[in-house]
Amino acid sequence: MSNSSELLLDAQNISVYYGQVQAVEEVSLKMHPSQIVTVIGVNGAGKTSLMNALMGNLPTNARSTGVVNYLGENISALEVERRVGRGLSLVPETRELFSSMTVEDNLILGAFRFRSDKDGERQYKLKDIYELFPRLKERRKQYAGTLSGGERQMLALGRALMTNPSLLLLDEPSLGLAPLIVREIFQMIQYLREQGTSILLVEQNARAALQIADYAYVLEMGRLSLSGPASELLHHPGVIESYLGLGSSQKAAN
């Protein structure tokens, strides 16, 4: 990764346990500002557990060890709400929307986790979210439970942006979506990075993730097996064989 001493996120030896079962084993990862970093791996590799540990959002039957440093501060003991206040925001795999509330009310609820604009950073407001996602504006009075899968993912992203994050953690944003919508979501991820938001992206869709990321980690059975610049991992024989499918070496080279 970059030699710059300025680290946005420095997670050291993160382990996650569910009772006596270890789901993540001493994983360390780093991020610099304005990067897209991806963690790829198959279902069950421990990606979601890792994300929840970084966010302080593990279920009550789980615990984590290790150190999470964010902008030089050890936030390991902070509750999730205080991590949001520091500038982290998680879009979970389940999206966790309020189905019986309108699109607009879901977005407004995101603003309740609002953090102040102390450093002159961009503040997202409803009008900004509607500009980013015109479909949400069209459906702003519609109940979230009636939205399509792609629209629900847009709403989950929009709600997270209402907290004005410096670091956005995205857990499987392409899960269950049509290819055209996946392309749209990944274009939005790139746009957000261009606007100054750093992205930690967990994905089973390794090709899509590696194509937009700066740096990548490969998680296998709770352990890191590989890491490096995403452009290199896109052509790594082991990654091609395990994650990119038959004939991917030719496609990745195009």
Image (cartoon, helix red, strand yellow):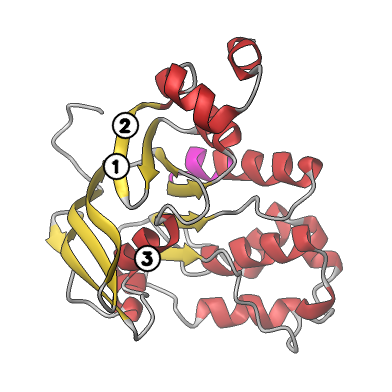
Measuring 71% from the left and 39% from the top, which residue is drawn there? 183
Q: Is residue 76 left or right of residue 112?
A: left
Q: Estimate how packed mark 3 is, as few (under 14), some (14 to 19) or many (20 or more) residues with alpha carbons within 10 Å.
A: few
The reply to whether residue 197 is visible in this rendering is: no
Q: CA distance from mark 1 to mark 3?
A: 36 Å
Is the C terminus in the top left, top right, bottom left or bottom right quadrant? top right
Which circle's residue, 1 or 3, is located before the other in the chain? Answer: 3
Of 106 and 169, the residue lying toward us: 169
Q: CA distance from mark 2 to mark 3?
A: 34 Å
- Element class at badge 2: strand
For the magenta stretch, what is the residue range? 191-197
Name the quadrant containing residue 25.
bottom left
Q: Which residue is mark 2?
A: 227
Across and down, in percent, residue 146 comes to: 84, 76
Between label 2 and label 1, give the one nearer the viewer: 1
Name the residue type under label 1. Answer: Leu
- Element class at badge 3: loop
Of 15 and 103, the residue lying toward us: 15
Name the residue type under label 3. Answer: Asp
Q: Which residue is mark 3?
A: 117
Name the residue type under label 2. Answer: Ser
Is the N terminus in the top left, top right, bottom left or bottom right quadrant? top left
Across and down, in percent, residue 165 comes to: 42, 61
For residue 224, the mark is 1
Measuring 66% from the left and 84% from the top, which residue is drawn there? 98
Q: Is residue 192 magenta?
A: yes
Between label 1 and label 3, give the one nearer the viewer: 1
Which circle's residue, 2 or 3, is located before the other in the chain? Answer: 3
